[in-house]
Image (tube, rainbow, N blue to C red):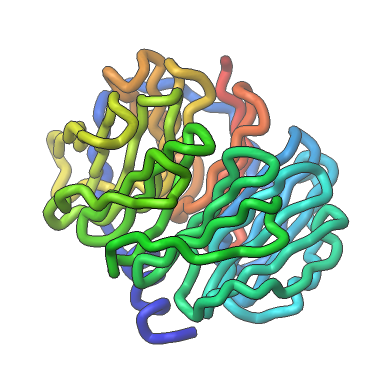
Amino acid sequence: MTHRLRRALWVVVLLSLCAGPAQAGGPVLSTDHQTTKSEATLLGIFFRSTQLGWAVGSGGTILKTVDGGAHWRKVSSGSSVLLTNVWFLNDRQGWAVGANGTVRSTKDGGNTWALQASGTESPLYGITFASATHGWIVGGNGTVLHTSDGGATWKEQTSHTNAVLYAVHFSSVQRGVAVGAVGTVIATNDGGATWSALEPFGGVTFFDVVFSDQVTGWAVGNAGALFHTTDGGQHWADRTFPCLQGCTKLTDLLRVRFTDPQTGWIVGERGTVYRTTDAGFSWQDAGSIAKVSLFGLSFPEPSQAWASGEKGTIVRFKTGK
């Protein structure tokens, strides 16, 4: 693992901050701590259905379940490098990305994995597909990779930034946003043929971004950072959580997902979970569902989610929706 990658990981993993809920008295979730028999830091998790899922992490770890996490088994990734994220187009075809420009693909549901040429040695962090053919990967040094052939090949796009990009999301094949270190936000309206960098948002580090519809999106980051856009990512409003009584420093918010335009979820340090049911107008503190930081979050359906994190942690929680 390179010094730069190690530093980036520890920035996320080792901060010891005090949670500051946006709103007290949030919902109580039904949780199930699943047994993985792994001590790896699981940075990415992806479920295709409530039965079929994968998690990836440190040491080249890839875990797979076919029974909703009742049993997780380790499969060989063919590598020992840090894997940061995972994405599946269907039950058989998927990708895992990570350190040293690693892109590994599977065509048999994650039972076997093969190395793909990425054209970069920069660490890779975020991956998304907007269709069966068009997908994007982002990472260090402003790296943006694009596929137009369903992930068979990847080509670099010009991002006009050297900042580390941690996450990317496309609300359509044409419109997408990537976020990262030093408040970096870049946006495209032409599928990445051209990317425009917005004015940096100060000292914020953004870890994730998601859109609930074509124009409404959310970005989360360190120290409770929460930013909101209603115009496809061209302008962002600061909705950062306040530091309430007893708080000395806000929790890092590490992953955000919306299950419909009204309902969204955030996970972060110390297993913290937040929920909105009014399109982000207010957020409720749903409590802590783990003793460790949670880096991965996947909703195969609105009523059930899986989160992954440090020390091989995978937690299933039911939303009550």
Q: Is residue 229 above or below residue 117?
A: above
- 88 vs 305, nearest the viewer: 88
Q: Report whether residue 189 is seen.
A: yes
Report the side of 60 relative to 232 (left or right): right
Q: Is residue 176 above or below residue 110?
A: above
> In the image, what residue occupies the spot 30% across and 36% down?
233
> In the image, what residue occupies the spot 38% across and 39% down?
189
Q: Where does the image place residue 132, in percent across and percent down from the top left?
A: 69, 41
Q: Where does the image place residue 263, in percent across and percent down from the top left?
A: 45, 20
Q: Is residue 279 above or below residue 141?
A: above
Q: Where does the image place residue 309, in percent across and percent down from the top left?
A: 53, 56
Q: Where does the image place residue 62, in percent across and percent down from the top left?
A: 71, 64
> In the image, what residue occupies the spot 71% across and 44% down?
89
- 187 vs 313, nearest the viewer: 187
> In the image, what residue occupies the spot 44% across and 54% down?
293
Q: Is residue 174 above or below residue 309?
A: above
Q: Report whether residue 313 is seen.
A: no
On-image quarter of the C terminus? top right
Q: Quadrant of residue 238?
A: top left
Report the side of 100 relative to 91 (left or right): left
Count of labels shown? Answer: 0
